[in-house]
Amino acid sequence: AGVAPVALQGAVTFRAGPVVLGTAPLVGGVATLTTADIPVGPQTITAEYAGFTQGDYEVYAGSSGTAAVLVGGVDQSQVGVYAAAGSV
């Protein structure tokens, strides 16, 4: 998942429906998660960025984005979830 501006800090949480797949740190505005825990079949993957606060101030609000994917017929240890910068 990507966020803008690329200097933002924090992490992105990835979910398949209600199931948390994992959390990945932002590096250069991009968080990438590779997992074998995505169930086979049609899934809605959500990437959630909690936002960025500095002191008592919310500098950047949180946001989320979803993608519909079909998982199956692949080596699931190699399944990755990635979205371009600015898409979360």
Image (cartoon, rainbow, N blue to C red):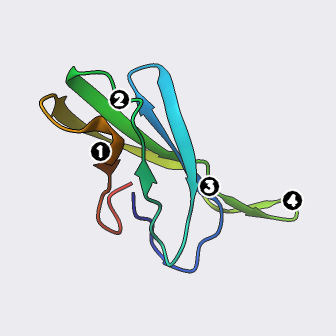
- Circle 2: residue type: Ile
Quadrant (top left, top right, bottom left, bottom right) of the N terminus: bottom left
Dot 2: element? loop
Q: Would you call the spot at circle 3 few (<14 residues within 10 Å), some (14-19), or many (20 or more)?
A: some
Of the image marks 4 and 1, the number of the one nearer the N terminus: 4
Seen in the picture, residue 17 relative to 61 is either above or below; the reply is: above
Q: What residue appears at the point 54 percent right and 39 percent down from the top-left corner?
A: 22
CA gap, disc 1 to disc 3?
A: 26 Å
User: Which numbered disc covers residue 51?
Assistant: 3
Q: Would you call the spot at circle 2 few (<14 residues within 10 Å), some (14-19), or many (20 or more)?
A: many
Of the image marks 4 and 3, the number of the one nearer the N terminus: 3
Q: Would you call the spot at circle 4 few (<14 residues within 10 Å), some (14-19), or many (20 or more)?
A: few
Residue 16 location in percent, x, y? 38, 27
Of the image marks 1 and 3, the number of the one nearer the N terminus: 3
- Circle 4: residue type: Asp
Q: What residue appears at the point 25 percent right and 25 percent down from the top-left corner?
A: 43
Seen in the picture, residue 85 relative to 81 is either above or below; the reply is: below
CA gap, disc 2 to disc 1?
A: 8 Å
- Circle 3: residue type: Gly
CA gap, disc 2 to disc 4?
A: 37 Å
Q: Are marks 2 and 4 in contact (CB under 8 Å)?
A: no
- The residue singled out by tag 1 in the image is 79
Q: Are marks 2 and 1 in contact (CB under 8 Å)?
A: yes
Q: Of 56 and 10, which appears nearest the observer?
A: 10
Q: Are marks 4 and 1 in contact (CB under 8 Å)?
A: no
Q: Are marks 4 and 3 in contact (CB under 8 Å)?
A: no
- The residue singled out by tag 2 in the image is 38
Q: Nearer the viewer, mark 3 or mark 2?
A: 2
Q: Of 79 and 43, which appears nearest the observer?
A: 79
CA gap, disc 4 to disc 3?
A: 13 Å
User: Which numbered disc covers residue 56?
Assistant: 4
